[in-house]
Amino acid sequence: MQADLVIRNEKLVTAEAVIEADLAVVDGKLAAFGNGLNAKQVWDAQGCLVLPGGVDVHVHPQMRYGSQTTADTWYSASRAAACGGTTTLIDFVEPRPAQSLIEALDERLDLIRPQAYVDFSLHMTLNSAAEDVLGEIPPIIERGVTSFKMYTTYAGFALSDESLLAALEAIQRAGGLALVHAENDAILQWRLNKLRDAGTTAPRHYPLSRPPDCESEAVHRTILLAHQTGTPLYLVHLTTAASIREVEYARSQGWQVFGETCPHYLVLDDSRYASPNPLDVIAAVCAPPLRSRSDQSALWHALETGSLQSIGSDHCAFSLYRQKATGLENFVDCPPGLPGIEARLSLIYTYGVCSGKISLNRWVDLCCTQPARLFGLFPQKGTLQVGSDADLVIFDPHLTLKLTSHVDGASYCLHEEVDYTPYEGLEVSGWPATVFLRGKPIVHRRQPIQPYTLGRFLPRQPHLVL
Ligand SMILES: [Zn+2]
């Protein structure tokens, strides 16, 4: 067999194994593993790790937020994702009030298609459980959008328990998966009012508005609501030991409940809010907030044991100086969210694998394989199997890089189109040297090299492959 591409001299890392073998690509798909394979083009991986392209199922590039939009474009965010070794993104469709879901989906596809540097899929946001909205769930699933995001807080998005139940039931009937952002809206509003009345609204008071209970109560309630309707549930951005216990209980009962956390909750902690510089504090405002070191240890432990199944970046890139700084007087005015689409693989490698908290295989499982499985993209994405898309990351484990958001000869300048990174000055071990999307190199020597946008929309199947 004459392949299009052979990669030699590497260690292949999957969720199950580490194997020393060459791999061959034909027509953008993995075609063979072995030794002595021939091809028109041969790449020497020079002893690096080769893993399946990262799958990040929680990103918000070019997202509207009230009257604002995040600082990046879909193009810049997806290019940054590629540089960090992520070749599949799942973004969110957010319909405007009273807009039909199908129309909102078409608008989002029109916006993304010409800008997608990597492959992508979409979740649909449900900001209402009105009958006509829920009636659109089956046709949305037919279009390949099989997961539905709901919120228990945020004006314009929050669903009551009654609405959540109605939506969960409709999702279950149509064979979909529910994603929920779980925080108790009443606790949050009550605390915000108290802080406002006391005049304690400086950035450093932000975490007081969203204590751990605010999250774990809503996680508990959402799990039980999803249990009533038998709907598979994926809880986004879990941050506390108490939330993990809720997920563990549900899973011990055999319920289809899955938990995600994010790199910033694993690498950063609430000591950021004690910084004497309010700009540093505002730069760390995300929802839920960064938590204590003990919650952080619980998250790592849950990733290792399998109580949490997925790591998404929740990339949300507001400009620090232009957008987040509006919250310097009153944190309520700071749009929450942190950029992080690029460093996810490397941060988890550095803080998880190199520090002995998780294995190499678990790293690939959490960042590539499980997200692909849970969202119906497996085995096309997230693994190295004959027939899978040849989305490949040649990851150099020997590199040491210092991260920065601005050009500085000595450090690695992230490609995220935003004026800061919460990881400024942080040293990471290991970084993707070369990245392939369906057999085509899109990143080489840590720089994007593809002049065209090759990303395609990935329609998904309604059944879960677990
Ligand atoms: Zn999010």
Image: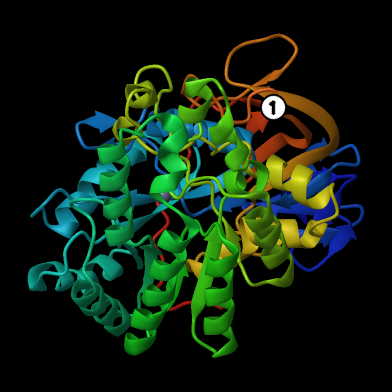
Which residue is nearer to you in this view: 282 or 263? 282
Q: Mark 1 points at which residue?
A: 446
Q: Quadrant of the N terminus?
A: bottom right
- Provide the secondary structure element on which disc 1 rests: loop
At which x and y percent is residue 272?
58, 34
At which x and y percent is residue 332?
31, 36
Q: Is residue 380 left or right of residue 444?
A: left
Above or below, 213 against 349 in this view is below
Is the CB of the residue bearing disc 1 within 8 angstroms of ligand 1?
no
Which residue is nearer to you in this view: 341 or 38? 341
Q: In this view, does 53 lie to the left or right of 58?
A: right
Q: Is residue 302 left or right of residue 336?
A: right
**Hey, what amino acid is under mark 1?**
Arg
How packed is label 1: few (under 14 Cα within 10 Å), some, or many (20 or more)? some
Residue 389 falls in image quadrant:
bottom right
Residue at (63%, 57%) from the top-left corner?
A: 295
Which residue is nearer to you in this view: 414 or 225? 225
Above or below, 402 against 345 in this view is above
Above or below, 11 against 466 in this view is above
Residue at (33%, 88%) from the top-left corner?
A: 228
Residue at (28%, 84%) from the top-left corner?
A: 173
Residue at (29%, 77%) from the top-left corner?
A: 168
